[in-house]
């Protein structure tokens, strides 16, 4: 039943978040914990960023556990096994965040099959089959659920040396729509956030290159290249009862970049 007293609360919810130990994933985890959710946080390794994210979530008084695993094995088996391990930690999981992903591109003329395949498997295939495992479990139990993907502005706008990444993120947007049609009748709600450029470990070049940062700020209507923290609250909203009638949508968290054809020439 919807939470009528505070529809933005996630109290009573338990979320599995892939790629949740740093960057956008960690920001999502912190916001979900702040909204009242317990967490199983997936990461590639148990390292300092993972422990920092766990501690930050626990500081909100929520349960947060780490699940270490690689998503690059045989897709259906790897994701099914991962989900079963997550259920062993928290059998009450009712929310899934498919955030894990990567960027490996370079010059298209040098793009290898291995790079394209690895990008696609992490950014798209893992989310497909982890969602399938989640949905099978919830449907068998006669229960609904919530699923969120992390897309990207690159699913809508392209840039050089991003062919594999842009293709994968465009697929995520289509996937969210298709899963909506498949799963909404089964009471499982699927949406996505699509960040613009935010500061994460994968975008350190912006911190190291003031000229590049200024160029990106110029291309963003609100003039900001913020931290990944801006991604957390929109994710929490889409997973809350406040978004009960929002299905199959991608919410751009981009300072308006996707709305602007091109900036004015600088003086």
Image: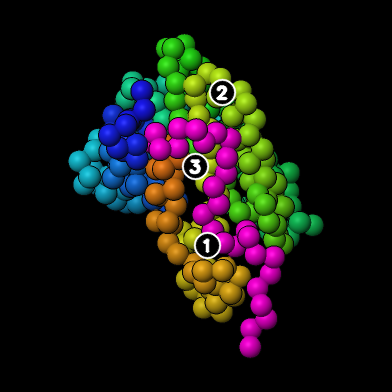
Q: Which mark is residue 87?
A: none
Q: Residue furthest right?
A: 109
Residue 176 drawn in magenta = no
Which quadrant, please, contains the C terminus?
A: bottom right
Q: Residues within 10 Å of mark 1 (few under 14, many from 20)?
A: many
Residue stretch in magenta: 240-267
**Which residue appears at 45% of the width and 64% of the height?**
226
Q: CA distance from mark 2 to mark 3?
A: 19 Å
Q: Main secondary structure of the magenta part?
A: loop
Residue 112: give x, y in percent of width and height. Answer: 73, 48
Compared to 40, does 252 lie above or below?
A: below
Q: How is the image coloured?
A: rainbow
Q: From the viewer's perspective, is 248 left or right of 143?
A: right
Q: Which residue is mark 1?
A: 255
Q: CA distance from mark 3 to mark 1?
A: 20 Å
- Judge by depth and name the residue closer to the eye, 92 or 186: 186
Residue 263 drawn in magenta = yes
Residue 129 shows in this picture:
yes
Q: Which residue is mark 2?
A: 183
**Which residue appears at 53% of the width and 27% of the height?**
131
Looking at the image, is mark 2 or mark 3 nearer the viewer?
2
Residue 103: give x, y in percent of width and height. Answer: 59, 52
């Amino acid at each position: 039943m919807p939470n009528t007293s505070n529809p933005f609360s996630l109290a009573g919810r338990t979320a599995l978040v892939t790629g949740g130990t740093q960057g956008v994933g960690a920001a999502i985890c912190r916001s979900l914990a702040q909204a009242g959710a317990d967490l199983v946080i997936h990461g590639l390794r148990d390292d300092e960023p993972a422990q920092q994210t766990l501690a930050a979530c626990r500081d909100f008084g929520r349960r947060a556990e780490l699940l270490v695993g690689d998503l690059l094995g045989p897709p259906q088996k790897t994701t099914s096994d991962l989900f079963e391990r997550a259920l062993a930690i928290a059998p009450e999981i009712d929310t899934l965040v498919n955030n894990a992903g990567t960027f490996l591109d370079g010059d298209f003329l040098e793009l290898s099959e291995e790079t394209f395949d690895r990008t696609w498997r992490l950014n798209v295939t893992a989310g497909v089959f982890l969602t399938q495992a989640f949905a099978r479990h919830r449907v068998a139990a006669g229960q609904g659920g919530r699923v969120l993907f992390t897309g990207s502005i690159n699913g809508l706008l392209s840039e050089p040396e991003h062919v594999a990444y842009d293709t994968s993120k465009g697929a995520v947007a289509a996937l969210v729509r298709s899963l909506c049609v498949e799963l909404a009748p089964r009471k499982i709600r699927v949406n996505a956030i699509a960040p613009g450029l935010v500061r994460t470990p994968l975008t350190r070049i912006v911190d190291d290159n003031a000229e590049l940062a200024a160029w990106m700020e110029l291309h963003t209507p609100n003039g900001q290249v913020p931290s990944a923290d801006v991604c957390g609250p929109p994710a929490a909203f889409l997973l809350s009862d406040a978004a009960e009638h929002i299905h199959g949508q991608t919410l751009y968290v981009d300072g308006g970049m996707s709305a602007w054809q091109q900036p004015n020439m600088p003086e």
